[in-house]
Amino acid sequence: MAEKLGIFVSSDKHLDHLIGISRAAKEAGKEVIVFLTNRGVLLTQDPRFPEMEGLAEVSLCNVNFEAFGLKKPVPVVKDKDFATQARHGMMIEDVDRYIVL
């Protein structure tokens, strides 16, 4: 079974790092799981965000998404992945390594 890397994103300033880390981990055979919260949900509005397609399973905090007035659909994020902070907790339990951006 592939090792899993969890990436918790609460900032809207590091999309280049998120894409780069996700790409490198995927190329190394790791499964990548991303959870966006707080200002991190704003990354979904960046024109480069669709580059995450195929690199990671991406979910986000729906409360923060709605608080910023953002609307669905969002490339890369499936309807089932508009979640609560409980999803973040599940990610922590499920991954071998965990980083915060």
Image: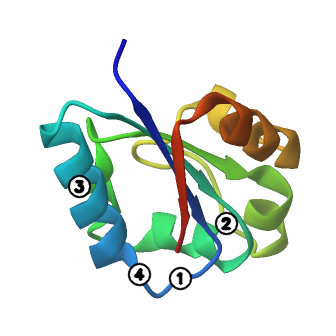
Q: Are marks 2 and 3 in contact (CB under 8 Å)?
A: no
Q: 89 or 52: which is nearer to us?
A: 89
**First reached walking from the N terminus: tag 2 or tag 3:** 3
Q: Position of residue 23 (x, y in %)?
A: 20, 51
10 Å crowding of disc 1: few (<14), some (14-19), many (20+): some
Let me know if residue 82 appears in the view.
no
Dot 4 amino acid type:
His
Q: 49 or 35: which is nearer to us?
A: 35
Dot 2 amino acid type:
Leu
**First reached walking from the N terminus: tag 1 or tag 2:** 1
| Disc 2, SS | loop
Dot 3 amino acid type:
Glu
Q: How many marks can you see? A: 4
Which residue position is annotated with label 3?
Answer: 51
| Disc 3, SS | helix
| Disc 1, SS | loop
Dot 1 amino acid type:
Asp
Which residue position is annotated with label 1?
Answer: 12
